[in-house]
Image (cartoon, coloured by chain):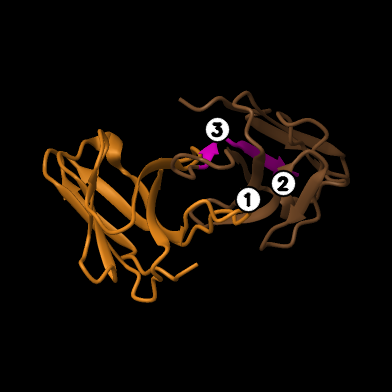
């Protein structure tokens, strides 16, 4: 069972607010990822990290930013939330190298911006 | 990573085997076939992976054709809890810094 956690699980917030979605893993994985998924749609990679102080943008352009100061922690921040940011945000991690190169996913944060 | 093609949706009767196909005709020699599934509103879950031999674990079996251009994920006795979107992904194993790219997958509905 993977040990990767996301908080909050649900968030309803007004336009213009700054928000931070938390993601933590206790497996010591080097690689961490953020995906965005609208209901019934594909997952899109928005950010990833190879390790501490390393961050990269994913395939889908996002107004969010990330940081990786500690191995176990990979928070995602929206400086000014807008209704277009309403979506589910999924965090994942994987080991380098991994026995199965498996990505483990957290339960997700469902964000609604009013 | 090679492109994959999967049916949009499939139905399966509870207790029967669910056979989910995946085409990956442009797969290269060092690319593996991975399967993940995503149950409604949850994060995707790893199921199985293989290179060229058939593989089996406690969740499923993976059958890869000899030419490796297609594969089939088999859930031997589908239950209602297997209703999910199933993703077939082809990539080089331990490919360094390449995250998984999820396509549209196959939406499997297990019917009582």
Q: Which mark is residue A49?
A: 2
Determine the residue positioned at 24% across, 71% down: B67
Q: Which residue is mark 3?
A: A107
Relative horizontal placement of residue B8, taking residue B110 as reference (left or right): right
Callouts 3 and 1 close, C-beta under 8 Å:
no
Determine the residue positioned at 58% across, 52% down: A38
Q: Is residue A106 magenta?
A: yes
* Labels 1, 2: front one: 2
Q: Earlier in the sequence, mark 2 or mark 3?
A: 2
Q: Which residue is mark 1?
A: A36
Which stretch is magenta?
A: A103-114
Q: Earlier in the sequence, mark 1 or mark 2?
A: 1
Residue nearest the observer in this picture, A3 or B26:
B26
Relative horizontal placement of residue B6, taking residue A76 as reference (left or right): left
**Could you tell me which secondary element the residue under label 3 belongs to?**
loop
Q: Indicate the quadrant where residue A12 lies.
A: top right
**Could you tell me which secondary element the residue under label 1 belongs to?**
strand
Few, some or many C-alpha atoms within 10 Å of disc 1 (few <14, some 14-19, many ≥20)? many
Q: Which chain hosts label 2?
A: A
């Amino acid at each position: 069972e993977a040990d990767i956690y996301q908080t909050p699980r649900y968030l309803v917030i007004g336009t213009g607010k700054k928000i931070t979605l938390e993601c933590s893993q206790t497996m010591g994985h080097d690689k961490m990822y953020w995906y965005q998924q609208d209901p019934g749609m594909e997952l899109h990679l928005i950010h990833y990290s190879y390790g501490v102080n390393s961050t990269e943008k994913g395939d889908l352009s996002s107004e969010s930013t990330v940081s990786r100061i500690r191995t176990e922690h990979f928070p995602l921040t929206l400086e000014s939330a807008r209704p277009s940011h309403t979506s589910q945000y999924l965090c994942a991690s994987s080991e380098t190298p991994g026995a199965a190169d498996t990505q483990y996913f957290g339960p997700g944060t469902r964000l609604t911006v009013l | 990573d090679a492109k994959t093609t999967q049916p949009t949706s499939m139905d399966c009767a509870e207790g029967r085997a669910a056979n989910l196909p995946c085409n990956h005709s442009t797969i290269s020699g060092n690319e593996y076939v991975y399967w993940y599934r995503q149950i409604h509103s949850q994060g995707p879950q790893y199921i199985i992976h293989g290179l060229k031999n058939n593989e089996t674990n406690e969740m499923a079996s993976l059958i890869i054709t000899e030419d490796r251009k297609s594969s089939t994920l088999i859930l031997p006795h589908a239950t209602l809890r297997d209703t999910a979107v199933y993703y077939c992904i082809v990539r080089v194993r331990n490919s360094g810094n390449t995250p998984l790219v999820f396509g549209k997958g196959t939406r499997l509905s297990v019917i009582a």
